[in-house]
Amino acid sequence: MAKRTPNFICQSCGAVYNRWKGKCEACGGWNTIAEETASSNPMVGPVATRPTRAKGRVFPLEPLSGDTHEAPRTASGIGELDRVTGGGFVRGSVILLGGDPGIGKSTLLMQASAALASAGHRVAYISGEEAVAQVRLRAERLGLSGAPVELASETNVEDIIATLSTGKVPSLAIIDSIQTMWTETVESAPGTVTQVRGSAQALIRFAKTTGSAVILVGHVTKDGQIAGPRVVEHMVDAVISFEGDAAHHFRILRGSKNRFGPTDEIGVFEMSDSGLREVQNPSELFLSGRDQGTAGAAVFAGMEGTRPLLVEIQALVAPSPLGMPRRAVVGWDQNRLSMVLAVLEAHGGLRLGTHDVYLNVAGGLRITEPAADLAAAAALVSSLSGVPLPSDAVYYGELGLSGAIRPVAHAAARAKEAAKLGFERAVAPPPRDGTERSPLRLNPMAHITDLVAGIAASKPRQRPALARGEG
């Protein structure tokens, strides 16, 4: 019998130690290191399936130049999902889908499974968390019970691969979720780092050898990261996260890695009683219900991947009774807000040190690009002065530490999307070459002082309040 040696493995990042520690030195997590028993036999696990060779095999090397072919894809029938994946599921690819519990991952996958199965493809849905009856109830609720989707409730990876290998190779196999799977080649509990890594490796090998597309559903931690070792994200071909808030009715499907397509693409869905509905014009959804006559609201013309997206940024600046004023932000980077406030104080002449500042991206969308600096600054100045911003204007531009407003990419696409929704003006930095045509009337802003002066000039009696920093 092979000798068993204990290992101490971090359940967050997969770092291995020879003894227990309270804090993982790799990821900084506390109480994440657990003992797992691994075999000292080097032939245990996936390596045991490889034939023994005395020396390596010489394989041919190809030149960099040559014929290229587009990877064969299978369209899911859901436009927003195909947008994020790059046009459909690539045969033999593995996708890792993460999201908060109850966000709608299983609903989205059930709709995609039904669409593919109805088109004549073999689709297998393997659930490790729910029984077959529970999956059928969800399908009936969504009106998809008539789709020829093959269901099973199983957690053993070897049994799953043996079942999927019989008959016609499935075009899509869904594993819900990878944390519940276990393989006989690893002696540890399901959900541990070793089991997740071993199970994912076996399923990836099945996908590559058979040409079946596999979707692995992954749990997320309390900070929104996909649970399990980060090495799983490097092993798969694409990583997609399903984002949203229970208080809002729309969901964002965001791609952060894709070996066969663009990254940072998003798909927008709306949660309804009959499941997830595609949103063809997300800008109109995010701007619905906005109050055009309220101070502290600016419309930002942003970009998510190749898609222009308009969203409202709301700010509230109020005198603070505390010695250390609050700085709260939702949907934007906290450090970015601190930088914008510092620039407004140093170069804009505003006094915000005694005020509470709250910033919110309406609708629950999270913005990461620096082009939102100008819109956030405009909302803050508007809230502090009490002057509403023009309802027909959009804002975009990057703010430098010197107070200069820098141009951003894809200005024409931003302006075109804004004009389609009825906006007439764009408050933005001057174009780089000066010859770029825009469907909007441009109000050029080269420095933060131009923005502050422009907002103050729309209501002259507010100028003293701006100088004193009073609302």
Image: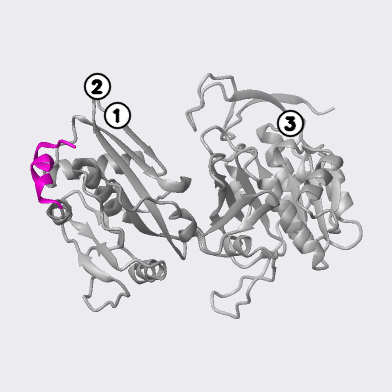
Q: Residue 81: which numbered mark, if any?
A: none
- Dot 2 falls on a residue whose secondary structure is loop
Please name whichever residue, 161 or 413, is drawn nearer the observer in this view of the structure: 413
Which mark's residue is nearer the viewer, 3 or 1? 1
Q: Are marks 2 and 1 in contact (CB under 8 Å)?
A: yes
- Residue to which mark 3 is pinned: 40
Name the amino acid, label 1. Arg
**Residue 467 x/y as whole percent:** 9, 41
Q: Could you tell whether 231 is left or right of 379 in the image? A: right
Q: Earlier in the sequence, mark 3 or mark 1?
A: 3
Q: Which amino acid type is marked by label 2?
A: Leu
CB within 8 Å, label 3 to label 1: no
Quarter where residue 404 is shown: bottom left
- Specify the label residue 322 is tagged with: 2
**Residue 315 visible in image:** yes
- Secondary element under disc 1, as helix, strand or loop, is loop
